[in-house]
Image (tube, rainbow, N blue to C red):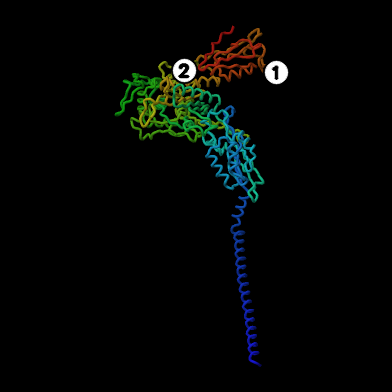
């Protein structure tokens, strides 16, 4: 075989080997790649399975909850608060439905345009509110408040815009129909339907009710497609001891007194001393709880239970009652007050206005309000016994559960009472009290010596049942005989010609009371220009229907600053209207009942008639032959009621009580359709009854 052929064969053999080697290398590469791919897929499958196990097992509960939150959203539906009523069922506070505007930001395509239109509808959109709307609506949330509890006009204008993502929600808004009437006592409610002050806060758990829920379901794009509601449960209504009319009288006269005396403010409280029921609680200045945000703190403060003052001479009632109860002195015990001053250490205490009352019986120490006499009585009683009576009369701690914000007052530890401190306390200084504490203490004297817890809640209405709050006698302060003696002594303050409260006299009634004039502490020193003028008393003194306190802060008017010239006249005006409203007649020489014969009666009829088996007919209004009743001295309300019952239209002019009427009392009612009534403030004396033939 030739050499060329051999070379060709050799080349071909080597090429086959190369081909075989190349084929072998390719298979290896494929196997390696397949292994890598299989390993990757295996690891990927393991990772997926591990993640699935984590999601389905370990994180299942959390993810399910997150999905539920994204799909469903809950909004609280505030319950309607219970009503607050006065003792006669008149509405003092209620709740009304109000529209709240909210947004679903995820449904709003153009936030800027929506905000511009909303602010245009509001008409009073502030830059701060506009920026708040920008911040709220720019977040892709499912819910955001736009404006809560808007007026019907605003709600109507926003509805007319028909904006996508803007919706409405009904909320409960508190409404006080009498505006400022009893504002401090009632308090107010915040925008979240929670009581923030007064009775609204003290009884919030009962008045509030149980909130409901609104469940909103969203789709994957957070668009709401369903809405379910669980209705709220309304709260319980509360009936107060307050009488709407007496509250109006107290506020009216207190305001007039503060204005007349150019005072910084004041308080007046009317209490039933036999039950502890507060019939009225007035403060000046006042505010409108419908718009409490615009009122200043000084206007919203309930002075009657929050402000402390040194009571001055009204506190001498405690000092004298301790002396009488401990039998260290009697009403006729003589006390030497000469020369109208007393020195205790380096301190000199004088009588008011430099008086020197010489020797006084204990009863006149109260009538003349002698500081020296009170100090000597206090020294005779002693610090231990006097401090015990201070506690018995409720000073130094809260006296009513209806006022959680009540100031407990300031009473020094008896162990720290020096001779100077004892002298100060005996005449009403160096002790801080509230008007409520002071009238509650004097009420204990009025009812015969029992300290009854003052309260303002009369009943609760729950589940269509009325739960009455019973009077609570806490303790006995003094014996009934001591209370009677003290009542007689306090009558001299008003009834005696030299008493300090002759301006409190009401013709026909006996009144027991005590004046107080105390300098205010200003920058750690007693002021020579700012005083607290007060008067506290009860009427009729022997069968008390009401106890009343009037405290005037810093009077600077024509009546100066004394309790007898500033507060006593206000007391008189409040008491006059109260007695007339309650139908309590004079207790001094009460007039005989007036008997008027009807027209056509031929003879007087006996007082007691023969019993008849038939029921007595109801009197017809404006019965023919009737006569015009005597309306003098009645309030406008009572006079109107009487005339309406007779079918007569009253025409009123003036302010206060009936001073004159036309037709006059006793004239025939035939053809009478209108009665002209002239009203005037102050006491109006009824004409004496003429003897009947």
Residue 256 percent location from the top left of the image:
48, 22
In the visual, does 474 lie left or right of 619? left
Residue 15 percent location from the top left of the image:
64, 83
Q: Secondary structure at mark 2?
A: loop
Label 2: few (<14), some (14–19) or many (≥20) C-alpha neighbours in 10 Å:
many
Residue 187 vertical position relative to residue 258 in the rendered view, above or below: below
Residue 224 percent location from the top left of the image:
65, 46
In the visual, does 628 lie left or right of 560? right
Residue 306 vertical position relative to residue 643 in the rendered view, above or below: below
View extreme (bottom): residue: 1
Residue 169 percent location from the top left of the image:
62, 40
Label 1: few (<14), some (14–19) or many (≥20) C-alpha neighbours in 10 Å:
few
Q: Which residue is mark 1?
A: 614
CA distance separating discs 2 and 1: 48 Å
Q: Quadrant of the C terminus?
A: top right
Question: Does the rendering let one see residue 288?
Answer: yes
Q: Secondary structure at mark 1?
A: loop
Which quarter of the picture shows residue 421? top left
Question: Does the rendering let one see residue 444?
Answer: no
Give me the residue at 61% from left, 14% from top.
675
Which quarter of the picture shows residue 100? top right
View extreme (left): residue: 346
**In front: 454, or 74?**
74
Which quarter of the picture shows residue 37? bottom right
Q: Which residue is mark 2?
A: 505
Are discs 2 and 1 less than 8 Å apart at CB? no
View extreme (right): residue: 614
**In front: 182, or 278?**
182
């Amino acid at each position: 075989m030739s050499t060329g052929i051999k070379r060709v064969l050799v080349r071909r053999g080597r090429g086959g080997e190369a081909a075989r080697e190349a084929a072998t290398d390719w298979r290896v590469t494929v196997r390696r790649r397949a292994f890598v791919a299989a390993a990757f897929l295996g690891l990927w499958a393991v990772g997926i399975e591990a993640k699935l196990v984590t999601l389905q097992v370990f994180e299942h509960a959390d993810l399910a909850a997150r999905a539920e939150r994204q799909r469903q959203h809950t909004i609280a539906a505030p319950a309607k608060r219970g009503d607050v009523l006065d003792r006669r069922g008149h509405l003092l506070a209620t709740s009304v439905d109000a529209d709240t505007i909210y947004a679903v930001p995820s449904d709003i395509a153009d936030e800027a345009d929506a905000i511009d239109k909303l602010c245009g509808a509001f008409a009073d959109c502030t830059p701060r509110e506009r920026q708040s709307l920008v911040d709220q609506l720019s977040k892709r949330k499912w819910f955001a408040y736009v404006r809560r509890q808007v007026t019907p006009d605003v709600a109507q204008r926003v509805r007319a815009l028909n904006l996508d993502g803007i919706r409405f929600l009904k909320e409960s808004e508190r409404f006080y129909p009498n505006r400022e009437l009893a504002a401090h006592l009632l308090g107010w409610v915040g925008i979240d339907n929670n009581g923030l002050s007064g009775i609204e806060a003290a009884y919030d758990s009962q008045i509030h009710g149980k909130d409901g829920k609104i469940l909103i379901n969203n789709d994957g794009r957070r668009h709401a497609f369903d809405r379910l509601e669980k209705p709220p449960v309304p709260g319980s209504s509360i009936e107060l001891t307050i009488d709407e009319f007496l509250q109006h009288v107290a506020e009216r006269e207190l305001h007039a007194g503060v204005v007349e005396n150019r005072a910084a403010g004041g308080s007046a409280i009317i209490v039933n001393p036999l039950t502890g029921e507060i019939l009225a609680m007035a403060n000046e200045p006042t505010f409108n709880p419908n718009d409490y945000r615009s009122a200043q703190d000084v206007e919203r403060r309930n002075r009657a239970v929050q402000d402390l003052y040194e009571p001055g001479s009204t506190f001498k009632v405690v000092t004298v009652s301790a002396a009488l109860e401990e039998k260290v002195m009697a009403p006729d015990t003589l006390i030497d007050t000469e020369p109208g001053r007393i020195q205790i250490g380096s301190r000199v205490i004088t009588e008011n206005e430099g008086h020197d009352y010489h020797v006084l019986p204990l009863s006149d120490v109260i009538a003349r309000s002698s500081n020296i006499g009170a100090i000597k009585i206090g020294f005779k009683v002693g610090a231990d016994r006097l401090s015990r009576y201070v506690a018995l009369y409720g000073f130094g701690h809260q006296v009513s559960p209806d006022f959680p914000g009540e100031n407990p007052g300031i009473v020094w530890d008896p162990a720290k009472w020096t001779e100077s401190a004892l002298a100060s306390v005996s005449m009403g200084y160096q002790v801080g009290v509230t008007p409520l504490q002071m009238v509650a203490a004097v009420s204990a004297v009025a009812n015969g010596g029992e300290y009854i817890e003052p309260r303002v809640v009369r009943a609760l209405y729950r589940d269509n049942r009325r739960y009455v709050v019973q009077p609570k006698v806490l303790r006995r302060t003094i014996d009934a005989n001591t209370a009677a003696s003290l009542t007689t002594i306090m009558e001299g303050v008003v009834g005696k010609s030299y008493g300090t409260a002759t301006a409190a006299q009401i013709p026909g009634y006996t009144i027991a009371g005590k004046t107080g004039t105390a300098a205010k502490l200003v920058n750690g020193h007693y002021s020579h220009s700012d005083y607290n003028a007060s008067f506290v008393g009860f009427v009729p003194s022997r069968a008390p229907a009401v106890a009343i306190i009037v405290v005037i802060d810093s009077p600077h008017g024509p009546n100066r600053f004394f309790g007898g010239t500033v507060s006593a006249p206000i007391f008189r005006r409040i008491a006059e209207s109260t007695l007339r409203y309650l139908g309590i007649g004079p207790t001094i020489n009460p007039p005989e009942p007036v008997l008027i014969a009807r027209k056509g009666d031929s003879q007087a009829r006996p007082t007691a008639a023969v019993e008849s088996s038939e029921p007595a007919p109801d009197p017809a209004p404006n019965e023919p032959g009737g006569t015009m009743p005597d309306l003098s001295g009645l309030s406008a309300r009572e006079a109107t009621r009487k005339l309406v019952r007779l079918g007569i239209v009253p025409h009123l002019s003036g302010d206060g009580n009936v001073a004159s009427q036309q037709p006059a009392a006793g004239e025939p009612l035939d053809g009478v359709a209108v009665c002209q009534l002239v009203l005037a403030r102050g006491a109006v004396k009824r004409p004496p009854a003429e003897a009947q033939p």
